[in-house]
Amino acid sequence: MRRRVPARRWALVLVLALAGAAVGLGLSLARDKRYSATSAIVVESPATGAPRSPQRDVATAVGLLRQGVVDRRVASALGGSIGADVRFDADDDSDLVVVRATAGTGARATRVADAYADAYVAYRRRAVLAQRSTRTTAIRQALAAVPDGPDADSVRGALRAQLGQLAAQAGTADVRRAGVARPPRSADSRHVVRNALLGALAGLLAGLALVALRQRLDPRLRHADDVQAALGLAVVARIRKSRLLAREQLATGALPEAETESLHALRAEVERFAAAHPDVPIVVAAAGRGEGATTVAWQLACAASAPERRVLLIEADMRRPTLSDRLGGAEAPGLAELAEADDVPAADAIRQVAVATVDEEAAPRVVDLILAGDPVARPADVLASDRARELLDDLARSYDLVVIDAPPLSAGADLLPLLASGSGVVVVGRPGTTTRRGGAELREALGRFGPPVVGLVVNGA
């Protein structure tokens, strides 16, 4: 079964996306202005005469700078702290190392970029001088140690040539500055649009993830089609959301036309069923509480009532009887007393409730009512008793229509005796209240006991 996403969850995704965009925009606008300046270092042929790999030399210089070999010298030159963000990058098209400094002012960025370039050139020159000194010392030691022999002169000549090359390279290094950094004319872009879009994307992704999580964890069926698919029944009526029907007190007055239209459709379907199944009560059942089975049972009885037609409504929910509270309690015995005592006549338990009509000149209508009665320890045993079955059969033969407000399946086994009695069943489901598990359990119970089913009423559609 395809699980659709409620519209308000898509609204949550939109809200999170807009919130992300607002955060990105706010952070960009609140960010201090930043200025960037660049300086470059040229990596030249090594003065040692060793074989050269330009890309390797540049990568080595970048690596040394990133490791902070000159950070302390730069900080000292700038008065104790660097005060900028610095990046070091290799230029793929040349032998340049680019130093990019970003600070709160253009002057500071320029000073930092130049300071790093100067510090690295000085660092590299010291390293080259140390390398030449070490090599010079080694050559002179080798020259002094050349033994006399036929090849001694040629060996000494080669060593003296190397000393000459080193002397000629005095004062040169393999790195140098490429000009000086130029002060920036304007601050760097704060990427307001980009950051707002990134924030919106982050909010959108967060919203989608949240919706997916809530969809997975939400046990409720959110749409009428989902309720129908879960129960596997044909829809005989769709009762739209109504403030009047949702009131805590059941409406005993005349309903507006919009509310009565679907109830008349349900009444017509029940009458068609009754014509094919005479003297069979109609059980109005639901998977759980809060799905509106009591309201549907009451409104069905009212819609089916007529001056020449006798209609009886029986409250069979003995655990949480709500009809007594909504229509006013009575001292008369209820279903529990009728099913447990043979000496209590059914007439003593019946009370009449007037049903108002839109046409004030129309003949009065009434619905006979049997309330649940006093609470009992085991309602399922009472409803499954032979006395209860005989009572329901007698009442079904005495009335044109008997409607039973059944306990929900979630109340335990209380509903099962009514499903096994052969009564017709009207199932009530409510989008946003009926759960997948409850719908599946009720569908399984209907399949197990096999009562004749009138159809499904989607309440609050």
Image (cartoon, rainbow, N blue to C red):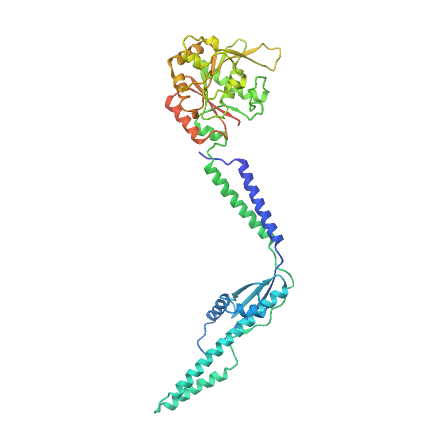
Q: Is residue 163 left or right of residue 181?
A: left
Q: Nearer the viewer, residue 321 or 151?
A: 321
Q: Is residue 45 visible?
A: no
Return the x and y of residue 289 as percentages of the image width and height. Answer: 48, 25
Q: Residue at x 55, y 40 (%)?
A: 12
Q: Nearer the viewer, residue 91 or 369?
A: 369
Q: Nearer the viewer, residue 269 or 23?
A: 23
Q: Quadrant of residue 363?
A: top right
Return the x and y of residue 37 as percentages of the image width and height. Answer: 60, 65
Return the x and y of residue 90 as percentages of the image width and height. Answer: 51, 66
The count of marks equals 0
Q: On screen, 131 above or below 290?
A: below
Return the x and y of residue 123 as percentages of the image width and height. Answer: 51, 73
Q: Is residue 144 left or right of residue 351?
A: left
Image quadrant where one finds the N terminus = top left
Q: Is residue 99 visible?
A: yes
Q: On screen, 361 above or below 31?
A: above
Q: Residue furthest right?
A: 185
Q: Residue furthest left?
A: 149
Q: On screen, 228 above or below 371?
A: below
